[in-house]
Image: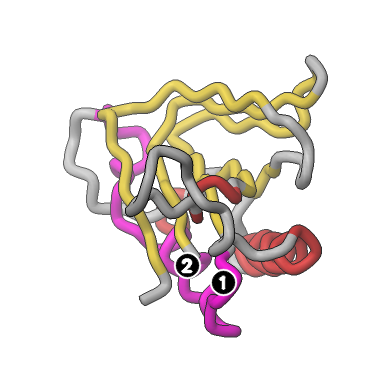
Amino acid sequence: MRAVVSTVSEASVSVEGKVVGSVSGPALLALVGVGREDPLDAWETVARKIAELRILPAAGEPWESARNHSAIDVGAPILLVSQFTLMGATAKGRRPSWSDAAPGETASKVIDKMVDYLRDRGLHVETGQFGTMMKVHSVNEGPFTVIVEAS
């Protein structure tokens, strides 16, 4: 399992021209890829890290200030978007292999568990629409982007 998490002042995802999820900042945009061989608890580890990563400024502080606070600390909303392409293997050849990505039915359930977990922690979570062609718009602040993995 892999997630690419960015601090954003705004982010949205649209499907067929209609916005299906959006956040304004300070907020996090989390693109999440679910792997075929992920341990059963990988989703919880990645969700916890997304919620607790200290990559945001204090509430009311400018983006340029120290980034010592988590989404939990400042109540930052999260836009979580399933992104199977994060599991693409590029070690050989010029065309990524998607064989490491979990099947859609499995990945969809994992994404739902992550969303529920984050909401249960009191966070406002918006999502994309699983299995559709999505357009993701983001205004990154920093830019500040990290890769989160379960191990």
Q: Is residue 22 left or right of residue 49?
A: right
Picture layout, residue 106 above or below residue 123: below
Magenta residue check for 56? yes
Tell me where the magenta segment starts and ends, as one range. Answer: 35-63
**Mark 1: few/some/many CA within 10 Å (<14, 14-19, 20+):** many
User: Residue 106 lies in what quarter of the image?
Assistant: bottom right
Looking at the image, do the residues carrying marks 1 and 2 touch, with CB atoms under 8 Å apart?
yes
Q: Residue at x 55, y 55 (%)?
A: 33
Query: How would you classify the magenta stretch by its main secondary structure?
Result: loop
Of all residues shown, which one is farthest toward the front?
A: 93
- Residue where numbered disc 1 is placed: 43
Of all residues shown, which one is farthest toward the bottom?
A: 40
- Residue where numbered disc 2 is placed: 46
Q: Is residue 2 left or right of residue 16?
A: left
SS at mark 2 in the image: helix
Identify residue type, mark 2: Val
